[in-house]
Amino acid sequence: MKPFLAIIVALSVAGLAKCAIIGRVVCDSSIAGDIYGFGATPVNGTIADRISFDVYQGSVVLVTNVASYNTRSTSGFLELNDLMSQYASQPFMVLAFPSTQFNREVPESNDEMMDALFYVRPGNGFVPTFPVFQKTLVNGDGEDAFFTFIKSGCSYTEEEFNVDLEYSPMTVSDFRQPFEKILVGKDGKPYFRYHASVDVSVVIADIDALLAA
């Protein structure tokens, strides 16, 4: 291949890769239902400790799937704690759901999850200031009904699927990787969805808007 043509091809491929990530999408908040009919069990708890999401009525809620052995694990968890600190005096909550459906990036058991965060990633004695729930199927067969609902009003944030997804069947609404996020308004409906690479400043602007609504 001639050098000039090779450069053109390389730039075209880079452009396609960039276009594959959509980033932030606006959800259809007119969908029927809300998050308040759902709930989940804390990662180190039992069914008796199950949290009903109706306790978050009137709050803005950031839902995210997380992983402890992902390249974004340290920055992602620290960022979530920072958000909790920033909005400590306002009706805001983060809900985090570990999932093994992305290259087995949550290898520990539910009982070991908090130790993994404390000692490994992020480590340095990290303790999340938001609920971390038990491992959850966010896509595919056996998908948790909460994620079926939360994704139903939102388009995808990335056009392509990663090769390390460990579930089937794949659908267009699937989460593609850990640390995707969906922002829920005070009415319990999804308003925005974010690719894992979206800068937190974008999320903060939307949180502020929904808190002020």
Image (cartoon, rainbow, N blue to C red):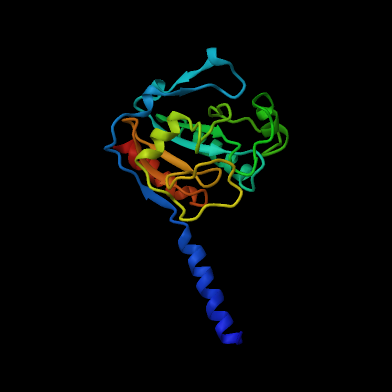
Nearest the eye: 59 or 45: 45
- Whole-percent x and y of residue 186? 33, 31
Left or right: 84, with 163 as reference point = left
Please tell me whether residue 186 is drawn above or below residue 162 in the rendered image.
Answer: above
Q: Identify the residue shown where x is 61% and y is 39%.
A: 67
Residue depicted at 56% across the width and 40% down the height: 167
List x then y, in percent, for residue 60: 39, 33
Is 178 displayed left or right of 32 in the figure?
Answer: right
13 shown above or below 173: below
Is residue 86 in sight in this rendering?
A: no
Q: Is residue 39 above or below residue 64?
A: above
- In percent of width and height, residue 1 lies at 61, 84
> Which residue is at the front of the view, 37 or 148?
148
Q: Nearer the viewer, residue 56 or 126?
A: 56
Location of the C terminus by quadrant is: top left
* Residue positioned most to the left: 30
**Image position, residue 127 (x, y; %):** 63, 30
Asked whether, in this view, residue 101 is left or right of residue 186, the answer is right
Q: Residue at x 26, y 37 (%)?
A: 30
**Quadrant in which residue 36 is drawn:** top left
* Residue 133 visible at all: yes
- The foreground one among 47 and 78 is 47
Total labels: the figure holds 0
